[in-house]
Image (spheres, rainbow, N blue to C red):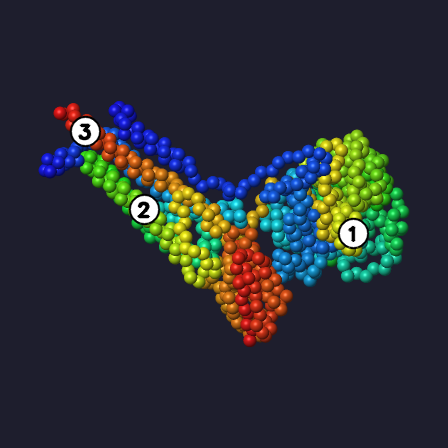
């Protein structure tokens, strides 16, 4: 047992070569995409809306298509079925998300500088946890909005789950939900951290083989 | 370097590729139900296809037709010939609430009718620029329609001294002026009773230049010229070579009274008046002229060169200037030819004082010196429009046809029957310096038998003709409301109307944008109700006032989505206004005792029937 843990600790304290460090740096840079690009997009078509209504979800705001008019239009339509209005103030995520992701990026850079396999494992776990939480949070928000319909709504619809990925028909609307640049960047960032870990592991293994 | 070749790098690359494939799946740009159309052959099929605008597709041209004595302007699409909209101008139109809200009621004044004759699109360098549409009406008024929102924004008039503003609203090539010419000569100023026996000497015609502000399009009085008591009929502005001159036809140069159909048709030739409007502008700026009826009127006798008369047979109706400005076509409605005058020859005749006499001091040019041709188009020529290739198209009322002829060679190449009795005609951009050709519409006076019978009161007929080939082809019979006198056809892509009034543009003092700001404020017996309309509620949903109060409801439609109109009908008060997205309108009335519902009259949403309120008057 003790033998195992010493080997583990030795492994984790292995230094990182250049390539994993570069991958970590790239991963940190990619996280900054959330400050510039939308995370997710919902596009809705209906016979009366052939040009579509668009909603872009950023880490710090909601933006409707057609110079912001679309989100107002979506809210006007939603009030008939009793769905809560989409207003920025209701989304606390917009307050802490940019800060938290910035902190994570800094932790990546810290891992890169302190440069051991253990540090990469650290930020990898953090990344996976955060990504899972973000996806869950998004899904839960969608669920909440689709299930807490006002009982006084003029038109009664059964509670529904808006699509998180792909296409779904909701009443007269074809709804398309897809990730956008910032989400892809975050996904790629996760892959880079994972990749950095794998590369570091193999490099550590080769070093041990060489030494032996 | 190692890492390029390492397996984990390969994994990363594959992951990126997978991601890229993943990323290429995103929202489509159009709904699932997008369609396309197919083709056909045969003659009728060809005509059908040329006029068929498939569902969802748009027409090529806007066709703005005057509404005649209906007082409105009608908007059609060409080639489908579908009536798209009615722009109310001189007559109340509850469908869009025109004439019911305070602003438009004020614009109409105390007239609820106007006889709209000739629409004129604003021009820059002799070409349509899509900014404004000007229309005249017989009570001496001119209106400006803003083509940004297709609304009547200004009505100017009645202008002093003008009686029966027929020869109007023709514009100059850079929209400097919109012209007016009197059909009826009267002793001026208005309000002067004159014995009919003094017609030849004491009755006067007037030609007025209405100034157009180059930035806002705002109309204002420019200048006025005193004319002999002829009936001034139609006009066209000189362009290019003849820019600076305005041409008007006239009839009853006999100065006759009584049974005009006999007495005013005796002379072989009447006149085309040629007015140097740049000179008139200069004289007006210098303050010249005699004050009559509150405006300065210039007498051409005192200003040689201001007006000339060109003899034209016989009781000429239309005068139309060719695209290069060098030929002026005068159509005498009581003969079988249309006369073409040469502008260079006119200038030479003026220089050489080649006159045959004068009318009230205005020189009359020698006919033979200025005429280039008498084109044998057919009986009863009225108006001429032009194509891009040197072709001219003249309407023939008596022959009930359109003749196609060539400028320069004066050869008549084709004739197509019109059903029936064509008046005006309009070719695509046909009165500009660069006509498009392609389409021509005959504005006919009689439509009997061409449509399902609708009783004695028959609609008008507008026939669409294909003029793209040498031989003209009739494509379509359309039926319009009474009664287009003239029209303007402009390429659709020259217009860019808005469909929503942006919130930032609404400067109305009573506009509100939040339901929180709606409510009632009182100032003595004047009550102001600020109301908001948005799907599907009026706020306030009810309010109370006192009997005898002067109530103003200021309604703002806070929608910013296209086509989201809301109407406000107040029963028992004869009030119905329609407010466009982003617009604010006011209605003012005296409150009478009772409980009165108000409701949304313009269908707006699934809960349109629930959009109502109550006004309680104690």
List the residue tagged with mark 3.
A205
Give the residue drawn at x 60%, y 42%.
Answer: B57
Callout 2 touching callout 1 (CB < 8 Å): no
Please tell me in which quadrant of the rendered image residue B105 appears.
bottom right
Quadrant where the image shows the C terminus of chain A? top left
List the residue tagged with mark 2.
A134
List the residue tagged with mark 1.
B183
Query: Distance of mark 3 from mark 1, alpha carbons?
Result: 104 Å
Indicate left or right for B342 with B214 as reference: right
Q: Choose between B574 and B281: the one closer to the eye.
A: B574
Give the residue drawn at x 55%, y 56%.
Answer: B604
Query: Distance of mark 2 from mark 1, alpha carbons?
Result: 79 Å
Task: Tell which circle, 2 or 3, labels the residue nearer the N-terminal end.
Answer: 2
Indicate left or right for B72 with B407 as reference: left
Residue B236 visible in the picture? no
Give the residue drawn at x 27%, y 36%.
Answer: A193
Q: Looking at the picture, does residue B564 appear above or below residue B462?
A: below
Q: Looking at the picture, does residue A82 appear above or below residue A117?
A: below
Where does residue B593 sit, x and y in percent of width and height?
59, 75
* Count of marks placed on residues: 3
Residue B91 visible in the picture? yes
Quadrant where the image shows the N terminus of chain A? top left
């Amino acid at each position: 047992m003790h033998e195992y843990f010493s080997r583990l600790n030795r492994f984790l304290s292995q230094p990182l070569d250049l390539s994993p460090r570069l991958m970590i740096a790239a991963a940190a840079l990619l996280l900054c995409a959330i400050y510039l690009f939308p995370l997710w997009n919902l596009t809705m078509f209906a016979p009366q809306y052939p040009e579509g209504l668009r909603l872009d979800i950023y880490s710090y705001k909601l933006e409707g298509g057609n110079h912001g008019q679309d989100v107002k239009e979506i809210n006007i339509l939603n009030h008939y079925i009793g769905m809560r209005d989409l207003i920025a103030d209701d989304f606390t995520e917009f307050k802490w998300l940019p800060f938290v992701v910035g902190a994570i990026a800094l932790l990546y850079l810290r891992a890169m500088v302190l440069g051991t396999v253990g540090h990469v494992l650290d930020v990898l776990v953090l990344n996976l946890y955060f990504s899972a939480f973000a996806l869950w949070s998004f899904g839960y928000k969608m669920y909440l909005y689709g299930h807490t319909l006002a009982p006084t709504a003029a038109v009664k619809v059964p509670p529904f789950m808006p699509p998180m990925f792909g296409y779904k028909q909701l009443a007269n609307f074809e709804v398309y939900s897809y990730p956008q640049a910032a989400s892809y960047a975050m996904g790629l960032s996760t892959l880079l951290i994972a990749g950095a870990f794998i590369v570091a592991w193999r490099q550590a293994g080769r070093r041990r083989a060489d030494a032996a | 370097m190692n890492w390029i070749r390492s397996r984990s790098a390969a994994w990363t690359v594959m992951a990126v590729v997978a991601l890229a494939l993943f990323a290429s799946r995103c929202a489509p740009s159009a709904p699932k139900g997008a369609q396309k159309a197919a083709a056909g052959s045969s003659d009728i099929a060809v005509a059908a296809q040329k006029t068929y605008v498939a569902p969802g597709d748009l027409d090529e041209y806007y066709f703005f037709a005057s509404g005649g004595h209906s007082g409105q302007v009608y908007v059609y699409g060409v080639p489908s010939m579908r009536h798209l909209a009615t722009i109310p101008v001189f007559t109340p139109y509850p469908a869009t609430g025109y004439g019911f809200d305070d602003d438009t009621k004020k614009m109409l004044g105390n007239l609820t009718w106007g006889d709209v004759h000739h629409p004129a699109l604003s021009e820059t360098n002799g070409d349509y620029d899509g900014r404004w549409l000007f229309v005249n009406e017989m009570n001496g008024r001119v209106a400006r329609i803003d083509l940004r929102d297709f609304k009547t924004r200004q009505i100017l008039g009645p202008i002093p001294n003008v009686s029966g503003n027929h020869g109007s609203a023709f514009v100059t090539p850079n929209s400097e002026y919109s012209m007016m010419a009197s059909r009826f000569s009267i002793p001026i100023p208005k309000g002067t009773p004159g014995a009919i026996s003094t017609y030849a000497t004491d009755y006067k015609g007037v030609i007025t230049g209405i100034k157009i502000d180059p930035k806002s399009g705002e109309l204002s009085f420019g200048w006025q010229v005193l004319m002999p008591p002829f009936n001034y009929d139609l006009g066209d502005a000189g362009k290019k070579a003849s820019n600076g001159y305005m041409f008007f036809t006239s009839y009853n140069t006999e100065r006759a009274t009584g049974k005009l159909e006999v007495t005013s048709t005796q002379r072989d030739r009447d006149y085309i008046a040629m007015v140097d409007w740049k000179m008139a502008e200069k004289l007006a700026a210098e303050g010249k002229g005699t004050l009559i009826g509150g405006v300065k009127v210039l007498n051409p006798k005192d200003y040689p060169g201001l007006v000339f008369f060109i003899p034209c047979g016989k009781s000429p109706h239309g005068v139309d200037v060719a695209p290069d400005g060098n030929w002026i076509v005068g159509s005498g409605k009581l003969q079988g030819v249309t006369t073409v005058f040469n502008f260079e020859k006119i200038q030479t005749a003026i220089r050489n004082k080649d006159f045959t006499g004068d009318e009230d001091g205005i020189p009359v040019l020698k006919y033979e010196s200025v005429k280039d041709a008498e084109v044998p188009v057919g009986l009863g020529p009225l108006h001429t429009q032009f194509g891009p290739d040197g072709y001219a198209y003249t309407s023939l009322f008596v022959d009930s046809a359109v003749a196609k002829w060539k400028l320069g060679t004066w050869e008549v190449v084709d004739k197509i029957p019109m059903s029936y009795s064509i008046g005006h005609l309009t070719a695509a951009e046909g009165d500009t310096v660069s006509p498009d050709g392609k389409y021509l519409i005959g504005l006919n006076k009689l439509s009997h038998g061409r449509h399902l019978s609708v009783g004695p009161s028959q609609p008008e007929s507008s026939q669409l003709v294909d003029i793209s080939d040498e031989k003209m082809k009739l494509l379509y019979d359309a039926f319009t409301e009474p009664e287009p006198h003239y029209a303007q056809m402009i390429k659709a892509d020259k217009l860019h109307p808005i469909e929503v009034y942006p919130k930032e543009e609404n400067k109305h003092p009573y506009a509100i944008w939040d339901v929180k700001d709606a409510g009632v404020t009182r100032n003595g017996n004047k009550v102001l109700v600020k109301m908001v309309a948005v799907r599907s509620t009026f706020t306030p949903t009810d309010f109370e006032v006192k009997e005898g109060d002067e109530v103003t409801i200021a309604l703002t439609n806070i929608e910013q989505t296209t086509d989201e109109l809301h109407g406000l009908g107040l029963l028992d008060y004869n009030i119905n206004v329609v407010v466009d997205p982003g617009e604010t309108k006011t209605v003012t009335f005296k409150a009478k005792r009772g409980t009165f519902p108000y409701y949304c009259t313009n269908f707006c949403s699934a809960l349109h029937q629930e959009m109502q309120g109550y006004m309680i008057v104690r």
